[in-house]
Image (tube, helix red, strand yellow):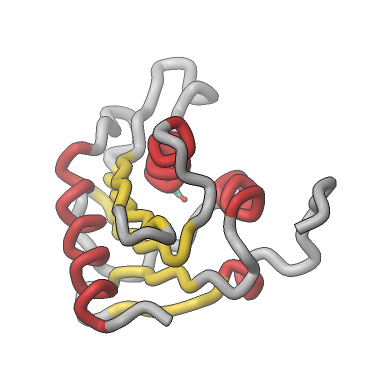
């Protein structure tokens, strides 16, 4: 259970990370904040590439930063995104990010999606039912 202060902090970090977004092609700026089980938070932004396929989403940037620093257990994720970084509707994670999250996160992990006013909340399992998985968890 993530407390409200932490949720609000994560949403603020995710919104702030949209400023780091490198999105000269889509102009869609995304930020993410990933809460580790010891309370550490790793942030990320989307980083686009002229090849398009080389683009990395904000959520995966945050996951890869955290995993590369030794974290493998996560308890919540906040995402903020919109055209030119203007947050309007909730920005749900893409399918590739949902699959990458499922590698390290439980199905009941909450995902908070920033909106112009407030946020929506889902679990990873709601966003990715019938998950493909090769490992016993
Ligand atoms: N994007 C993310 O960063 N996260 C998502 O889950 C959805 C899409 C980025 C990728 C690309 O840079 C831009 O948003 C438009 O698709």
Q: Quadrant of residue 136?
A: bottom right
Is 97 situated left or right of 119 in this image? right
Q: Quadrant of ligand 1?
A: top left
Is 120 situated left or right of 108 in this image? left
Q: In the rendered view, tell whether residue 34 sits above or below residue 27.
A: below
Is 9 situated left or right of 105 in this image? left
Q: Position of residue 12 (x, y in %)?
A: 17, 63
Q: Quadrant of residue 61?
A: top left
Q: In the rendered view, tell whether residue 27 sits above or below residue 14.
A: above
Q: In the rendered view, tell whether residue 15 sits above or below residue 3.
A: above
Residue under the point 40% across and 17% down: 50
Please state which of residues 35 and 57 is positioned toward the viewer in this rendering. 35
Residue under the point 26% across and 68% down: 88
Tell which residue pokes out farthest to the front in this image. Answer: 38
Please state which of residues 41 and 86 is positioned toward the viewer in this rendering. 41
Q: Position of residue 89 (x, y in %)?
A: 33, 70
Residue under the point 21% across and 47% down: 17
Please state which of residues 62 and 95 is positioned toward the viewer in this rendering. 62
Q: Name the quarter where the N terminus is drawn.
A: bottom left
Q: Name the quarter where the C terminus is drawn.
A: bottom right
Q: Position of residue 68 (x, y in %)?
A: 45, 31
């Amino acid at each position: 259970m993530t407390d409200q202060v932490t949720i609000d902090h994560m949403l603020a970090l995710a919104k702030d990370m949209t400023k780091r977004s490198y999105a000269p092609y889509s102009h869609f700026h995304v930020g993410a904040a990933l809460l580790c089980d010891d309370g550490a938070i790793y942030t990320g932004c989307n980083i686009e590439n002229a090849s398009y396929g080389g683009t990395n989403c904000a959520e995966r940037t945050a996951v890869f930063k955290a995993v590369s620093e030794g974290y493998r257990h996560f308890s919540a994720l906040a995402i903020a995104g919109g055209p030119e970084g203007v947050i309007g509707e909730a920005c749900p994670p893409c399918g590739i990010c949902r699959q990458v999250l499922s590698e390290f996160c439980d199905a009941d992990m909450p995902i908070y999606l920033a909106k112009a006013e407030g946020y929506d909340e889902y679990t990873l399992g709601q966003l990715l039912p019938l998950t493909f998985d090769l490992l016993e968890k």
